[in-house]
């Protein structure tokens, strides 16, 4: 037992010393992370105090004049509206073109309104940066069934 007992107790002492060192390491790491959090919190508090101080000095209009929130909102709303028009314009123009073509509209009336509508849609296309072919406004008299042509002629006789 003599030598073996001494080695055993020495081993236990070294093991407990190791556990104590490990415990101290964890404790110091934990305290360091808490102190880092404290530093971060203190820094955030200092920054927010500075902002409050600047706002109080320069009055509440500081935000409005320095960041011009209203014009930024207006600018973004305008861009969004422009993009919505750009996306929807081809469908709307096609729908209008299909609904004013003969036989729904008299060919003579169609001849009068098409240049106006084409010009109007072209101006909107230019304003929003869209490109819709003017071909959708063209129609052939062969597109109108003969029975409908005769019907409209009979109506005026």
Image (cartoon, rainbow, N blue to C red):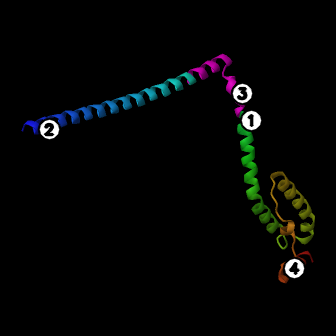
Percent x, y for residue 102? 85, 72
**Distance between mark 2 and mark 4 Cα atoms:** 115 Å
User: Whole-Å distance between the Cαs marked 2 and 1?
Assistant: 80 Å
Residue matched to label 4: 149
Q: Main secondary structure of the magenta part?
A: helix
Image quarter of the N terminus: top left
Q: Which residue is mark 1?
A: 71
Residue at the top extreme of this rendering: 57
Please tell me how crowded label 1 is: few (under 14), some (14-19), or many (20+) other residues with Cα within 10 Å: few
Residue numbers of the magenta segment: 48-69
Q: In the rendered view, does 119 fall on the left or right side of 98?
A: right
Q: Nearer the viewer, residue 138 or 143?
A: 138
The numbered disc on residue 8 is 2
Q: Are marks 2 and 1 in contact (CB under 8 Å)?
A: no
Q: Earlier in the sequence, mark 2 or mark 4?
A: 2
Q: Give the CA separation, mark 3 to mark 2.
A: 75 Å
Observer-nearest of 13 and 48: 13
Q: Which mark sits nearer the N-terminus, 1 or 4?
A: 1
Q: Report how far apart the C-alphas of labels 1 and 4 lie in the structure.
A: 56 Å
State the CA–CA distance, disc 3 to disc 4: 67 Å
Residue 104 placement: quadrant:
bottom right
Residue identified by numbered label 3: 66
Which callout, 3 or 2, points to the residue nearer the camera?
2
Residue 35 appears left or right of 68: left
Q: Earlier in the sequence, mark 3 or mark 2?
A: 2
């Amino acid at each position: 037992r003599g030598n073996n007992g001494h080695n055993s107790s020495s081993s236990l002492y070294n093991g407990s010393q190791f556990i104590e060192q490990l415990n101290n390491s964890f404790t110091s790491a934990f305290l360091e992370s808490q102190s880092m959090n404290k530093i971060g919190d203190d820094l955030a508090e200092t920054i927010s105090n500075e902002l409050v101080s600047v706002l109080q000095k320069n009055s509440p209009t500081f935000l409005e004049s320095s960041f011009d929130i209203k014009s930024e909102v207006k600018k973004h709303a305008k861009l969004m509206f422009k993009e919505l028009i750009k996306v929807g314009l081809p469908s709307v123009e096609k729908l209008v073109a299909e609904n004013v073509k003969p036989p729904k509209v008299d060919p003579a009336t169609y001849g009068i309104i098409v240049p106006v509508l084409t010009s109007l849609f072209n101006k909107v296309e230019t304003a929003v940066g869209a490109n819709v072919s003017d071909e959708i406004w063209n129609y052939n008299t062969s597109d109108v069934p003969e029975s409908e042509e005769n019907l409209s002629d009979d109506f005026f006789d």
